[in-house]
Image: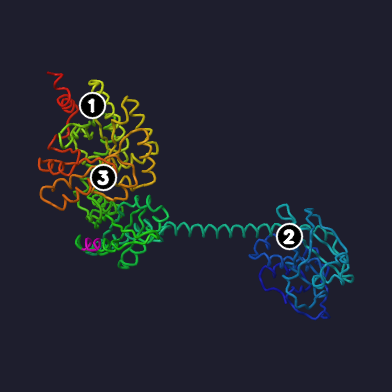
């Protein structure tokens, strides 16, 4: 039974004898007539000429090998043609076999299981004749299929692919068969060369298919990465933009608007520094999972990046509806999260925006939401704001202010003012707090509230702090040069948390003191509670280094942050400054009075002195004095003074008699 494919039929059309493929079961005694030798040369030439085209047309390697074996068996009048493949481990396997009717046999063995050892790695492409009896050491099932005991002689041609022996093309002839044609060796070599080319082609096709499959898998992976956030598994920024783009197209046809809300977790960097980045990542995953599970399924929740999340708000009729959703988001966030170490309470600022007729791209809607989020963050923690066009104007002003701020230091537009610190009992001057002001060329004198938050956000605060530290030290040197007998006044300089986290802060401070020629005991550095908790390990190290060479450290605005007694106990601090929010109501609130008294008592117990900030009335001074609070500063004594006014105050306080 012959193969019915067009390729096989074409190959066999030049032959007159019948070939039995290996899968056919026949009676060995059923002989057919031998081919007519009168047309063998014509058939052989046609076979050789057409073989390359046949090989290239076959889509399956095994079919190509079988077709070639059957065709060669016909045109050469072989009794058996076989093709073997040698694997890298030295095992050979029959890949194709064709019988003439003279050699037909019945077997129940499956061809792929026929293997034997073949260590011949010669790359010589020449065909040669051989005695089949020399193959008597082959396994019995292989000998049975090749009918070694019935074969008189044979020809074998190596199949060499890419410089390596891939296998063998073998032809066998029984004793009573017609002789080999005179050019049989050449035919085997030519056929083997074409088969080798065909094998190369199939291997290249397979490699191409594998590469295509790998490329498809890579593309699918990249598409998944683009579509979903790797940390939280939430839809990515790209998906949000696509969803907004589609929704905006629908919005053009329907009255409902769409919106987007951006959430930024408050103080997430402090959580990372305290609990570690692994715990921080877990919190982000839990945060995203809660949003996805608790919110309406119609809302698309996305991890926008870092500590920000986005929520697409479909069919938002008006800002009030969006505000309801934003408030719901806040309530979802309020429940504590389990970090594995402790419960963590999170808050988030939210900015949202609704689509406007002027919006043509989703990025415009996102920009409005980002503007609203920035406005919310500027107002404190857990704030919610919807976008308003005036916010855009504020952002433009902010951008202009940021540009000017970057140039202000080089242009020497900053100045220091000095607020006196006095002993409350005698109202004697004991030092100053140096406060920065910006002499803006067009806006006039700006207070810290107008530019310090911007400087902290942009990172310019470090350069500004460094300038303030250098300027204050130089000013102290000038006062000491003018009055060599100047009492030991101290000069307090504020440091931001960014500057405090600089790895070489202690060396920077020491360099400033040495450059100005000022001793370390004349300088106090003021830091806030949040600076300490952002990295407790770093804070302990830096404080120890500062104390080592004599610089004092004050904890500023105590009572407005975490006010943790544990922090006071852990860190080496010299001074506690009570925030003015506790001082202002002293006259009217006994509760506040009790709190201030407790702070003073605690500070003394820990070896610290106390400065009360914002003392504005005589009654406040008297109450603080009765509480044994040593020092104070505020408008009752003096507003922040220019350097000239501060110089005159020193002169009046300590050297008035010399002037007289």
* Nearer to me, 242 or 11: 242
Say if mark 3 contacts mark 2, CB within 8 Å.
no
Q: CA distance from mark 1 to mark 3?
A: 25 Å
- In the picture, which quadrant includes the C terminus? top left
- Residue 454 % position (x, y): 26, 42
Residue to which mark 3 is pinned:
603
Badge 3: few (under 14), some or many (20 or more) residues near its Cα, within 10 Å?
A: many
In the rendered structure, the answer to whether residue 227 lies left or right of residue 298 reads: right
Q: Quadrant of residue 580?
A: top left
Q: Is residue 203 visible?
A: yes
Magenta region includes residue 323: yes
Secondary structure, mark 3, is: helix
Disc 2: CA contacts within 10 A as few (<14), some (14-19) or many (>=20): few
Q: Earlier in the sequence, mark 2 or mark 1?
A: 2
Q: Which mark is nearer the camera, 3 or 2?
A: 3
The secondary structure that most of the magenta stretch takes on is helix
Q: Position of residue 439 (x, y in %)?
A: 20, 32
Residue 67 falls left or right of residue 336:
right
Please tell me whether mark 2 sits on a helix, a strand or a loop: loop
Q: Mark 2 or mark 3, which is nearer the start of the sequence?
A: 2
Which numbered tag is attached to residue 89? 2
Marks 3 and 2, how far apart at CA: 82 Å
Q: Is residue 202 left or right of residue 592?
A: right
Give the magenta part as a residue range.
321-327
Of the numbered discs in the image, which one, if any, rests on residue 487? 1
Q: Nearer the viewer, residue 229 or 315?
A: 229
Name the image colouring.
rainbow
């Amino acid at each position: 039974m012959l193969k019915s494919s067009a390729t096989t039929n074409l190959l066999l059309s030049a032959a007159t004898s019948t070939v039995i493929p290996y899968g056919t079961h026949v009676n060995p005694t059923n002989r057919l007539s031998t081919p007519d030798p009168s047309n063998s040369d014509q058939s052989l030439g046609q076979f050789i000429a057409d073989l390359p085209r046949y090989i290239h047309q076959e889509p399956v390697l095994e079919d190509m090998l079988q077709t070639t074996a059957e065709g060669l068996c016909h045109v050469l009048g072989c009794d058996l043609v076989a093709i073997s493949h040698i694997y890298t481990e030295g095992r050979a396997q029959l890949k194709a076999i064709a019988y003439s009717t003279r050699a037909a046999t019945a077997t129940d063995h499956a061809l792929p299981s026929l293997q034997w050892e073949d260590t011949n790695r010669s790359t010589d492409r020449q065909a040669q004749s051989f005695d089949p009896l020399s193959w008597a050491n082959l396994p019995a099932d292989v000998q049975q299929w090749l009918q070694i005991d019935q074969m008189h002689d044979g020809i074998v041609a190596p199949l060499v692919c890419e410089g390596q022996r891939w296998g063998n093309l073998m032809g066998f002839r029984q004793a009573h068969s017609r002789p080999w044609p005179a050019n049989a060796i050449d035919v085997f070599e030519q056929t083997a060369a074409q088969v080798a080319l065909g094998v190369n082609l199939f291997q290249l096709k397979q490699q191409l298919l594998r590469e295509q499959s790998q490329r498809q898998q890579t593309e699918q992976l990249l598409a998944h990465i683009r579509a979903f956030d790797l940390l939280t598994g939430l839809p990515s920024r790209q998906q949000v933009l696509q969803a907004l783009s589609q929704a905006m197209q629908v919005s053009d046809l329907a009255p409902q608007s769409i919106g987007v809300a951006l959430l930024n977790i408050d103080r997430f960097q402090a959580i990372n520094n305290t609990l570690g980045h692994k715990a921080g990542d877990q919190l982000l995953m839990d945060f995203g999972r809660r949003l996805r599970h608790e919110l309406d399924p119609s809302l698309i929740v996305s991890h926008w990046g870092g500590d920000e999340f986005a929520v697409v708000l479909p069919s938002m009729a008006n800002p009030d509806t969006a505000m309801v959703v934003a408030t719901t988001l806040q309530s979802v966030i309020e429940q504590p999260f389990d970090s594995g170490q402790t419960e963590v309470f999170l808050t988030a600022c939210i900015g949202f925006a609704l689509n406007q007729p002027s919006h043509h791209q989703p990025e415009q809607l996102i920009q409005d939401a980002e503007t609203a989020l920035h406005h919310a963050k500027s107002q404190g923690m857990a704030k919610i704001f919807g976008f308003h066009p005036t916010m855009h104007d504020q952002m433009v002003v902010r951008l202009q202010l940021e540009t000017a701020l970057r140039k202000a230091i080089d242009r020497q537009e900053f100045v220091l003012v000095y607020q006196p610190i006095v002993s409350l009992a005698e109202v004697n001057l004991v030092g100053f707090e140096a406060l920065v002001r910006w002499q803006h060329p067009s806006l006039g004198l700006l207070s810290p509230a107008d530019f310090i938050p911007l400087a902290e956000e942009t990172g310019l605060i470090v350069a500004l702090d460094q300038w303030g530290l250098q300027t204050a030290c130089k000013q102290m040197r000038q006062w000491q040069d003018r009055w060599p007998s100047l009492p030991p006044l101290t000069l307090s300089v504020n440091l931001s948390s960014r500057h405090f986290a600089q790895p070489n802060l202690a060396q920077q401070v020491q360099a400033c003191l040495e450059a100005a020629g000022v001793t370390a005991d004349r300088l106090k550095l003021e830091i806030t509670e949040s600076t300490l908790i952002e990295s407790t390990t770093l804070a302990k190290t830096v404080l120890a280094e500062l104390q080592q060479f004599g610089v004092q450290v004050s904890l500023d605005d105590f009572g407005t942050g975490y006010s943790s007694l544990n922090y006071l106990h852990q860190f080496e601090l010299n001074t506690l400054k009570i925030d003015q929010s506790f001082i202002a109501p002293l006259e009217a609130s006994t509760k506040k009075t009790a709190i201030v008294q407790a702070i003073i008592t605690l500070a003394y117990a820990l070896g610290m002195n106390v400065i009360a900030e914002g003392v504005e009335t005589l009654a406040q001074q008297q109450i603080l004095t009765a509480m044994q609070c040593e020092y104070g500063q505020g408008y009752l004594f003096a507003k922040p003074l220019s350097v000239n006014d501060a110089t005159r105050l020193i002169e009046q306080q300590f050297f008035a008699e010399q002037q007289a």
